[in-house]
Amino acid sequence: MVRVAFLFCVFAFSCFGFDLHSNIKSIISEQSYAKNRDKIEQIFAIESDFIDSRGNPNYAKITNTLRVNSLLNLSFALPVNLEIAFYSPSSDILLFKSVSEALKNLGYSYFLSKSLKTDTQGIVWQISMNSRFLLDPGAIYRELGKNQIYIKDINRDGEFSFTYSIDASKAVLSTHQYISDSEFDLAKPLEPYFLNISGKSEALIKSYASDSWICVIKVLDRDLNLITQIKSDKPEKEIYIKFPPNSYYMLIDDAFSLENIKRGLKIYIKSN
């Protein structure tokens, strides 16, 4: 269980710098580190080689170096119960969406959300999963990095328990692509459309004549807080929306089923 007091430790630690060897201990365990200390100190002698261009720990390089030197084993003969906590100063919705998306892309589709703790310093979201494989720090580092989300520190709380301190202050989530200032066809959706509307002023959204779109449109800020919403109780053929200040994302859905817009939608999004 992640204690609130530990949140402050993680926050303070991430503010004052990165301790390479503390992170290596967390990744491979203190026992393995102690057993191979001389070898590790030699391999990681130039610590600056393991910092990325943004000044964050390069967990992809760290874990790959451990692996090629036979110092990292992420698999077990039988499934184990993993407990992973993610700490962030960002909003809870942003934390949920960014981490859930990264885990899903890595093949972790099934996990249990155990607890959510918040205070003035940030949020700790704890999940558990049953797996034969530990979460690969290098893999999730790369996945989160695609959305400009960075791991600042990893702490091992137990044999199968970890806390990841992440920085999502510059996060830009994966969104559906479109072209501004011209009508654009959105293909048949497999999930609600999620668009980046930063720097845009308004939108006109049209459904196909043979579809029956019961629209749900949400405009969100950068932290995924709801700014405004349009929700219909009847089929719509055309919806116009002017974006309020601080609009950053737009989610377009159907109130009942995406089958109601199985032919997709047409959008015109105007730049400021």
Image: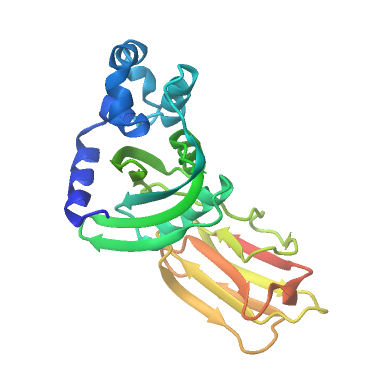
Question: Residue 13 is drawn in which quadrant?
Answer: top left
Q: Is residue 272 above or below residue 135?
A: below
Q: Give the residue displayed 54% in from the left and 65% down from the top.
A: 250
**Relative to 265, is 156 on the left or the right?**
left
Q: Give the residue displayed 46% in from the left and 41% down from the top.
A: 135
Estimate the x, y position of residue 24 in percent, counting from the top left: 33, 27
**Relative to 96, is 267 on the left or the right?**
right
How many numbered circles does the render carry?
Answer: 0
**Relative to 205, is 82 on the left or the right?**
left
Q: Is residue 72 above or below residue 79?
A: above
Residue lying at the far bottom of the rendered structure:
233
How is the structure coloured here? rainbow
Visible in this render: residue 222?
A: no
Name the foreground residue: 57 vs 176.
57
Question: Residue 213 is drawn in which quadrant?
Answer: bottom right
Name the foreground residue: 251 vs 136.
136
Visible in this render: residue 265?
A: yes
Give the position of the N terminus as an image quadrant.
bottom left
**Relative to 257, is 129 on the left or the right?**
left
Estimate the x, y position of residue 157 in percent, counting from the top left: 28, 43
Estimate the x, y position of residue 92 in percent, counting from the top left: 36, 61
